[in-house]
Image (tube, rainbow, N blue to C red):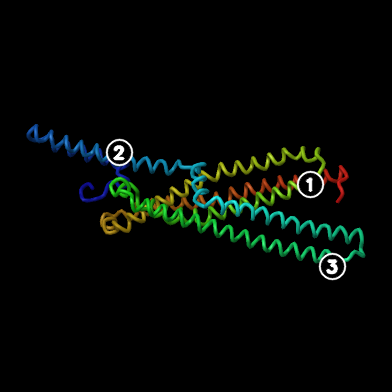
Amino acid sequence: FEDGSIVEMGPPAEVMESEAFRRIESQVEETASVGDGYPVSRHVGRVEDAMTMVKQANEAGSLLREEEVREDITWRTIWWWVRTAGWVNLFVLICSVFLQSIVEMRESLVLAVWIDAKVAYPDASDGVFMTRLIVVVLCCCAAICICFLAVSTTTLGAARSIHNQVMACLLKAPVDRFFDKQPVGRLINRLSFDMKQVDETFVQTIFGMLSMLAGMLTTNLFILWVMPRSVAFLSIPIYAMTFYFVYLYRGIAVPLVFHSKHSLSSVQDLQAVVISQCISIRSNGMMDSFMVRYNHYSQSVIRSQYLIYYVCRAWAQSRVFLCFGILAAYFALGGLYTGVSM
C-alpha cells in the first residue's frame, strides 16, 4: 500500500523485488534515520532482519512457481502412476487391448476369405462363412467388454489411490511452509483440473495409445509376415518418417500444455484475489488493471489449447496419414510386383 492505494500485488518474492517496494523501503529508512542513533539503528536492523526472514521464507514459493513453468513428464512420475494403478490391472488392460485388436483383425480376415472364395467359386456355401463370422463377432464383442472393464478397474483404482494420497499430504502439510506459499489458484487447479486430467484424460489417452499401437502392430506385423523380406525391409524408412512426425508433435504439444496449465493457474489466482479483495479493488479503481491481466491469461489459455488440439494435431495427422497412404500403396505395388497371392 502507498497513500491508501495498492501499487503492487502478487507473490511476496516478486513484490519485494519491485520498484515500488524499494521506494517505500527507502522512505522508511530515511524516516528512521532522523532521531537517536542507537534506537533507530536497532529498529532498522530489526526491519532488515524481518525482510531477510521473509525473503528466505518465500524463496521456496518462488522456486515452486518457476518449477511449475518448467515441469515436464518424467519416468519417475510415470512409474509412480503405474504403481498406483496396479501391475495386475495394467497387465490385464494391455492383454485385453491386444486381444481385441487380434480378434478384430481375424474378423477382417474371415470377410476377406469369404469374398475370395465367392469370387473363385461362385457356388461355395455361405453357411460356413456366416457361422465363422458370427463366432468371430461374438468373440470381438466379448473382447471389447473385457477391455472396457479393465479400463474402468484401472481408472477407479488409480483415482482412489491418488486422491487418498493427495488428501493425506494436504492434511499433514504445515500452514507456514506450504499454505502460505502456495497461491489459492494453484491449489484449486491441482485439485480440480489436474486431478480430472489424471483420473479421466490420462487413462483415456493411455487407452487410445494402446489401442492405436495394438491395431498398428497387429496389422503391420501380419502384412510384413506375408510380404517378401525385401519389400518388408525397404519399408523401414517410411516407418521411421512416421515416428519422426510423431516425435515432432510431442515436442511441440508438451510445452504448450504446460504453458496453458500455468496460465490457467494464474487466472485462478486472480479470481481468488478478486473474491477476497473485491471491495478494495473497486474502491481503488483497479478493475481495469485486473481485467487486462485476466484477459491476457485467458487469451493465453485459449490460444495454447487451440494450438494443441487443432493446429498441431491437424499438422501431425495430415503427415502421418500421408505416410500410411504411401505405405499402403507401396505394399500393394510390392505385392503385385513380387506375385503375392491375393
Residue 142 at x, y percent in the picture:
67, 63
Residue 118 is drawn in which quadrant? bottom right
- For label 3, the SS is helix
Look at discs 2 and 3 and give the one toward the viewer.
Answer: 3
- In the drawing, does residue 32 fall left or right of residue 204? left
Amino acid type, callout 1: Ala
Residue under numbered circle 2: 17
Say whether marks 1 and 2 touch (CB < 8 Å).
Answer: no
Distance between mark 1 and mark 2 Cα atoms: 63 Å
Left of 48 or right of it: where is 85?
right
Q: Residues within 10 Å of mark 1 (few under 14, many from 20)?
A: few
Numbered disc 1: secondary structure: helix
- Give, as a three-letter code, the residue at label 3: Gly
Residue position for label 3:
127
Residue 315: where, in percent of width, then height? 62, 47
Q: Which residue reaches farthest left?
A: 36
Q: Hey, which residue is sitting farthest top in the picture?
A: 37
Name the mark nearer the viewer: 3 or 1. Answer: 3
Q: What number is the disc on residue 329?
A: 1
Tell which of 309 and 24 is nearer to you: 309
User: Could you tell me the amino acid type at mark 2?
Assistant: Glu
Does residue 277 sit above or below 25 in this rendering?
A: below
Q: Is residue 271 left or right of residue 87?
A: left
The one of 45 and 222 positioned closer to us in this rendering: 222
Query: Depth-wise, is mark 1 or mark 2 nearer the camera?
Result: 1
Query: Left of 64 or right of it: where is 326?
Result: right
